[in-house]
Amino acid sequence: MQFGIPSVSGVHGLLMQAASSQFSLADDSTKNLYGFLHDAVKDYWSANTKDCLGKTPNFEDVLYAISALGSTYPAGIFTGTLGAFVEKKDFPDILYFGERKPVDWNVLSHLRQELEDGLLTEFRKRCREPDPALSPRVEQFKSFFAALTDEFDVAVATTNYDDLIYRSLPSIETGFDLAEGRFKQGRIIDRSSWSCLLHLHGSVHFDMDLIDGDLHGIVWQDDLNKGFHQNSFGRSPHRTAEGHAFPTSSIIAGYGKTEQIQRAPFRSYYSELDRLVHGSDAVLFLGFSLLDAHVRQAFTDYRDGRDRPVVFIDYANDGVMMAGSSFSDADTGPARAMRVFRVPPGEMKWLGYSHPDSVNALKAAKEFERCAVPGKRLSIWYNGMLEAVDNAPKIVNELAK
């Protein structure tokens, strides 16, 4: 958990709570449909894929399963092709509004809507009522961004829903007119300054309201204490030609993100991300794993001959091998960063060495694993975000080299 915002495992716990009221299993009220789906995916992976032994599905895996299962049911003109070939598996009955009911497309659709609404409500609560014990950390985070803005013009693209960056940079351009709450594309595309904040997957400040005849237009609500109207359960889902149904929500969650980002402001944000990456002098990744392909693709042409540094903030437990080691795990954030930014393992060095080693010495020295080859500069920090915030001068210096 960073600054009171739930980790991936923490989000799973929140969704278990969100599903406990209307989706408990009829024959065991201590369990619910979301948990049943989660455990079914976990058991399926364990039984069929050796590489996934011990791997636990995250909440996005389960949200995708819900949408994919829904696509196997007939739905008029939105009936997908998958149902012609895939036999729907048996589900336990649930207690739905107090009555026993078999699982069908409506239940699955409602479940996903309820999960996203519950997730967003909890995020808003945590941002509105932060843990007092974390206040010093929040102030340190603000100081960290102040150190960055003293040295650079900073533009931020985030996949997080929380308002930590907005609290640190309250005057930054978001594309929304705060007086009206409406998104105005020109504020992003036509702005003369560099700085902006792009919430690629939505924000706790995003709400929905009537805009130019659109009942589901996304607006900005600056005051988190006011009432919000996102309520995706009260809105028709967004249906695709493939038969998937996504909640009409003010956030983007689960897989199928490339379909969900077609709405404003997300569409404009992703266009601007490409322009920011192309025009940047340096890139800093703070806790982003590079798993989201639709975000990762913006960096595929970053190595275009310019000598631009990349600093990747990650956390690794003691004993984990360096990303540049031939013995390292190939499915980690640092390893993905090496692939995206075209750095061969043999060009990474740590504390002057290039032989296989664990991260222990680097973490103790609070130093980087580096590729210093001009045009391929990549610096990986293994001490995590909190230590990075506490060592802002080191991060700034690495970006400015």
Image (cartoon, rainbow, N blue to C red):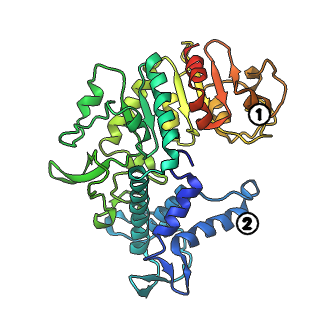
Residue at 37% in and 33% down: 197
**130 left or right, relative to 89:** left
Residue 47, label in figure: 2
Query: Left or right: 337 with respect to 111?
Result: right
Residue type at mark 2?
A: Ala
* Residue 118, numbered circle: none
Q: Is residue 103 above or below residue 322?
A: below
Q: Residue at x 80, y 40 (%)?
A: 319
| Nearer to us in this view, 121 or 32 | 121
Q: CA distance from mark 1 to mark 2?
A: 33 Å
| Relative to 99, 44 lies left or right | right
Residue occupied by mark 1: 359
Residue 229, located in which quarter of the rendered image? Answer: bottom left
Q: Which one is nearer the viewer's eye here, 131 or 103?
A: 131
Q: Secondary structure under badge 2?
A: helix
Whether residue 36 is visible: yes
**Residue name at image x 31 percent, y 30 percent:** 171
